[in-house]
């Protein structure tokens, strides 16, 4: 009898502690994100959660009903200047931090524009769409949306499909998986769909795993992309970008797809090594396939414009060298150059 009481008390204590931690987690995020919808998380499938930056407790609560039920979204920009929202990965964030302290969205701000940059290193269109919806949920809006996602779009092959999990079935069977650890990961994924506290705990553990470079314990981190991987990741990009465009349409906001140039793409082709490595060949295939997807999006949404910086060529190789700190990330000179080109393409007269 005494043993049964101890077991009952232990179980009761566990659930009580978990309830306190769960409620505290939701209350904290509701206050920090200024969105009480987090209390619906796990009960309402349209509610999602995203961590922009854990160290600063920057959270985003996403109500995906904005994609379904709202035919129009009220626009209330109180700024005298036009407001631009920018989305993208590290190439739209502040990179090359040892020699650079800015980004092209920061440099885009001028006498005509106020710019709010949602770009974040290591993220793709899954993350960007969540950030966009979260801002709409809070009643915010913009005059322009610059959608600069491209570089990290194939990350979903190893990191998972956050918004379109059904696409994962097309590639997961081909991954080299540790079955026991994969089961634990799947169970963890199921639990965090209902528990905010576990969501936070899982995110912290993943950050530790990546910091310690232990990702190979679950997935084969050395896996090379296949053409099928690129095709599926471009499907993910297509779905997310199309949904972002539908939001922009409800806002009556101008939507621009932006593809940024890279150092290899600008260098005089005659000075490049003629030998093409397998990774370079796959990168070329990725660009062709994704650009085909972008053209499809443009054809289906003729009000959307494409600022394709990959079409630009700069003959001065010394200037190119000063624009990059590696093959894709910009220095301050590079960010200023990108901002100047993009500024020339923005139509502020008819907005």
Image (spheres, rainbow, N blue to C red):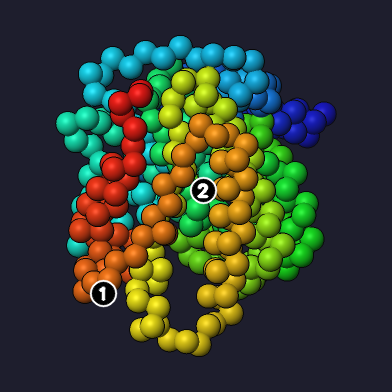
Coordinates of residue 336 in the picture (x, y in percent)? 22, 52
Q: Which of 79/287 is in front?
A: 287
| Residue to which mark 1 is pinned | 317
As displayed, is residue 149 above or below residue 331? above
Q: Where's the N terminus, which quadrant?
A: top right
Coordinates of residue 83 in the picture (x, y in percent)? 31, 27
Quadrant in the rendering for residue 322:
bottom left
Coordinates of residue 323 in the picture (x, y in percent)? 25, 64
Element carrying mark 2: loop
As displayed, is residue 312 above or below residue 25? below
List the single residue furthest toward the left.
111
| Dot 1 crowding, Cα within 10 Å, few <14, some 14–19, many 20+ | some
Q: Where's the C terminus, which quadrant?
A: top left
Q: Which of 155/344 is in front?
A: 344
Q: Which residue is drawn at 71% across and 40% down?
A: 190
Question: Could you tell me if residue 87 is visible in this image?
Answer: yes
Earlier residue among tags 2 and 1: 2
């Amino acid at each position: 009898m005494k043993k049964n009481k101890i077991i009952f008390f232990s179980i009761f204590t566990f659930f009580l502690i978990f309830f306190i931690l769960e409620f505290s987690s939701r209350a904290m995020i509701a206050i920090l994100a200024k969105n009480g919808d987090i209390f619906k998380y796990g009960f309402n499938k349209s509610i999602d959660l995203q961590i922009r930056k854990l160290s600063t407790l920057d959270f985003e609560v996403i109500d995906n009903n904005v994609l379904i039920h709202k035919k129009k979204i009220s626009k209330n920009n109180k700024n005298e200047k036009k407001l631009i929202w920018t989305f993208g990965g590290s190439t739209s964030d502040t990179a090359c931090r040892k020699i650079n302290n800015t980004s092209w969205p920061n440099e885009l701000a001028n006498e005509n524009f106020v710019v709010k940059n949602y770009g974040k290193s290591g993220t793709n269109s899954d993350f960007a769409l969540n950030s966009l919806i979260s801002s709409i949920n809070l009643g915010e809006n913009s005059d322009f949306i610059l959608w600069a996602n491209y570089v990290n779009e194939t990350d979903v092959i190893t990191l998972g499909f956050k918004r379109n999990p059904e696409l994962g079935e097309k590639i997961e069977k081909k991954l080299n998986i540790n079955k026991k650890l994969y089961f634990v990961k799947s169970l963890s994924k199921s639990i965090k769909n209902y528990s905010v506290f576990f969501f936070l705990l899982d995110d912290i553990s993943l950050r530790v795993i990546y910091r310690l470079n232990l990702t190979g314990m679950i997935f084969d981190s050395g896996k090379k992309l296949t053409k099928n991987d690129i095709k599926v990741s471009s499907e993910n990009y297509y779905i997310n970008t199309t949904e972002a465009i539908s939001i922009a349409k409800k806002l009556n906001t101008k939507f621009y797809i932006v593809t940024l140039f890279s150092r290899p793409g600008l260098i005089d082709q005659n000075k490049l090594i003629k030998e093409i490595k397998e990774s370079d060949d796959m990168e070329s295939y990725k660009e062709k396939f994704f650009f085909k997807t972008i053209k499809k999006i443009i054809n289906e949404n003729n009000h959307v414009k494409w600022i394709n910086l990959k079409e630009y060529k700069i003959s001065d190789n010394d200037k190119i060298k000063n624009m990059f700190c590696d093959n894709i990330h910009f220095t301050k000179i590079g960010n200023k150059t990108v901002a100047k080109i993009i500024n020339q393409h923005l139509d502020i007269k008819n907005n």
